[in-house]
Image (tube, coloured by chain):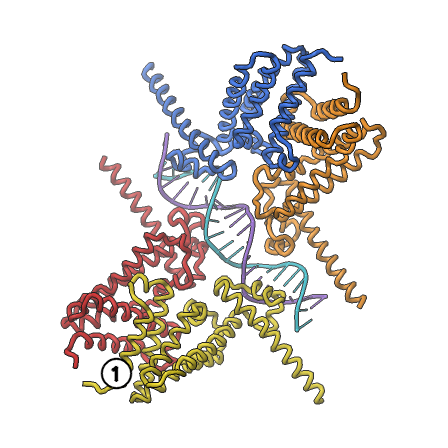
Chain colours: A red, B yellow, C blue, D orange, E cyan, F purple
DNA sequence: AATGAATGAGCCTTCATTCAT
DNA sequence: CATGAATGAAGGCTCATTCAT
């Protein structure tokens, strides 16, 4: 009996592994060609498969994108969590966790493409409402460490929610400007600007105001 | 000889006119179908031409996008200029001109797509370095009215440049979040957040600090 | 030895049962999606199997169609037999049994598709000559009740065979016209026309001729 | 000026010729592989074209089928008209024109497939309602010569319409039985049966009844 | 200047079937 | 007996672009 279970487990493991192979292939192809240039054919061929075989593991192209995005968001959350670890003061914590978010996308521009893919309109049929909710939740989660600090330095829940959104916006905007080469045009540095914003944010709550 | 020149001029005028016809067609098609859905066929057909004819006026699809973007930026500059007209105080001027930028893209999401098209990778040969420079200059110009106010309320040129970039980033980020539906997820309002940011910006320079 | 035989029998019974399960699934899928829309995947999935499993019970998709057609012909024969039961006079019997045939297909258009599938070319290897013979026999059987009445009202065997074939042809043609929407175009009613034909047929044999 | 017109005409002629080439290729492919087996790729390749080129001449596969069917119906009408030419008596005329219809399809079974393609459901999008009407009209037209005779031998318009429909049904049914090999099974001859039916039809109107 | 014609590569997806395990 | 995996061919169609005329 244990043998049978073991076999089942091994089969499952093998299956998962192959799904991973396709996933990795998709990731690579996407890294190289971008979302528009990543075709099922290319993904299949990169994974060593026939086009049709892909559909055994993923129902559609959109489902692959969903998986890619989900994994990207997990990495994001890890990066954010790791960023805040060594900070000691609340000020450092706030800046570090926010910078964790910023840096993740600054260092991985393709993840930025992925995260804002809806920008060009992912078909609703590809991204189920449930998955969509889950992805949005994980994106939100990535700001949780920052939000916690905001509350700790005296922001009300309403204020915190507002500030986090503004912070996210600021972050996204600077990333976008950098990603599209506008930062050079404006002769500024995205990271510095973002740090400034975070610093100001801290001071708005973290110290006595006049 | 003057006859020849005259003929040349007339021909040039005719040619320009026809280029405009195609341009207008492209604009309409793009408004209706978006960037992905706008094909050379549709544009040609809308302009009353066959697909091949387009290539006498535009070298490629990318070049059309470049022209579209250029025109979009002109409209942007007009919108920003108009926005600041009725403001009397410096505070009102700052907020109005910044809000002019924001609202232009909030109200015309297709122009936002266009502006961020590079995001998904316009082919390099479509946007010549020279055109690219020109477009970036016009984008920069749209922030000039706001920058002027910043200088008037006491910001140094360096500070003004920095703040404008940060403001642009904030603006772009909020627009992006709104455009991709994230604003609803975070239960916030983009315009309000942007106004807040502009207000804070004014207060950082516009009043005595403690 | 008897043990072995018993086991074999039981195995056979189990096998038959599972074949039935697949058959029923095929029938359902075919009813819902039609011949074109019925794929092996759908059939397998409906039966609770993987596609490969089907091939232990049916050699090919065509073989399933053969089985489907066979069962359809059984239902046809039952319908025809039932139709003639309450008729008392020979005239009523003739009309009722012929109408039984007609109505079966008029009421079950999917069976008509099945019966005329060869029309679009069933692969030869799907329908073995032996099965083909059997199916044709059952089709012929469905006209037997009608043929009996013809003989009873005085038709010679040769005449009866001829008339039955003509009747079958008339029936098939009217069904076809109805099924393809031609009846509306010609502004006629298929059932009425068929009844007329049957009535005329009766009168050709059932009464004194001048 | 006449030169320009001539050039336009020649171009049109050339274009028509190429459309014809594709049409002929489609006809051939369809003859060889049937409707299901005739793919755009095969048609294109047979015509010496790339798949995409076809769409310059026909909007879709369904449009090609429409053209094929239209042409088939024209040939049908010609065949029917030709069939009645040498007949002298009304009886001969009736039988000849009806037999013209029958024989056309008996001799060209692929045209039968085409004519009853709706049997398997041509997508409504492929066959515009207007074309559908036209095709049905042409099909109806093919029975006009027969209908005329019916009226001449004393049938009322209502009777004629009814009889024509029944005749069409009889014809279609016998063709179907023959096409699917049932005629052999029933050991009868389709043409003879059809002639019998036509003869009876004539006698029902063409002579005094007792 | 413009057309009409054509290319060729590409798109995502579905299918019946096979076969090692 | 059944699975899970994979094949390979095919499906209709769209696209930006080119080029002879």
Q: Which residue is found at the position 58% from the left and 74% from the top? A: B20
Quick check: can you spot residue C132? yes
Residue B195 lies left or right of residue C145; in this view the side is left
| Rendered-image quadrant of the N terminus of chain D | bottom right
Return the residue nearer the eye: D207 or A112: D207
Q: Which residue is found at the position 32% from the left and 16% from the top? A: C3
Residue D172 lies left or right of residue A110; in this view the side is right
Quick check: can you spot residue D27? no
**Residue hosting label 1:** B204
Return the residue nearer the eye: C76 or B191: B191
User: What x and y, as percent, mark residue D99?
Assistant: 75, 30
Return the residue nearer the eye: E16 or A156: A156
| Rendered-image quadrant of the C terminus of chain D | top right
Taking D1 as reference, is B74 above or below it? below
User: What x and y, as percent, mark residue C141?
Assistant: 57, 18
User: What x and y, as percent, mark residue B181?
Assistant: 35, 62
User: What x and y, as percent, mark residue D15?
Assistant: 71, 57
Figure quadrant of residue D143: top right
Q: Which residue is found at the position 56% from the left and 44% from the top? A: D123
Taking B39 as reference, is F5 above or below it? above
Taking E7 as reference, is C202 above or below it? above
């Amino acid at each position: 009996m244990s043998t049978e279970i073991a076999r089942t487990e091994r089969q499952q493991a093998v299956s998962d592994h192959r799904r991973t192979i396709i996933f990795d292939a998709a990731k690579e192809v996407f890294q190289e060609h971008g979302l528009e240039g990543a075709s099922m054919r290319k993904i299949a061929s990169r994974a060593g498969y026939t086009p049709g075989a892909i559909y055994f593991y993923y129902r559609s192209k959109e489902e692959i994108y969903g998986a890619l995005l989900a994994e990207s968001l997990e990495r994001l959350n890890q990066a954010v969590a790791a960023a805040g670890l060594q900070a000691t003061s609340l000020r450092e914590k706030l800046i570090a966790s926010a910078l964790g978010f910023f840096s993740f996308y600054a260092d991985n521009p393709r993840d930025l493409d992925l995260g804002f893919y809806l920008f060009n309109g992912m078909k609703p049929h590809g991204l189920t409402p449930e998955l969509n909710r889950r992805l949005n939740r994980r994106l939100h989660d990535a700001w949780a460490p920052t939000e916690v600090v905001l509350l700790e330095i005296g922001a009300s829940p309403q204020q915190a929610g507002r500030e986090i959104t503004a912070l996210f916006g600021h972050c996204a905007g600077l990333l976008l400007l950098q990603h599209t080469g506008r930062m050079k045009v404006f002769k500024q540095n995205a990271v510095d600007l973002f740090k400034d914003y975070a610093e100001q944010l801290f001071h708005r709550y973290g110290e006595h105001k006049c």
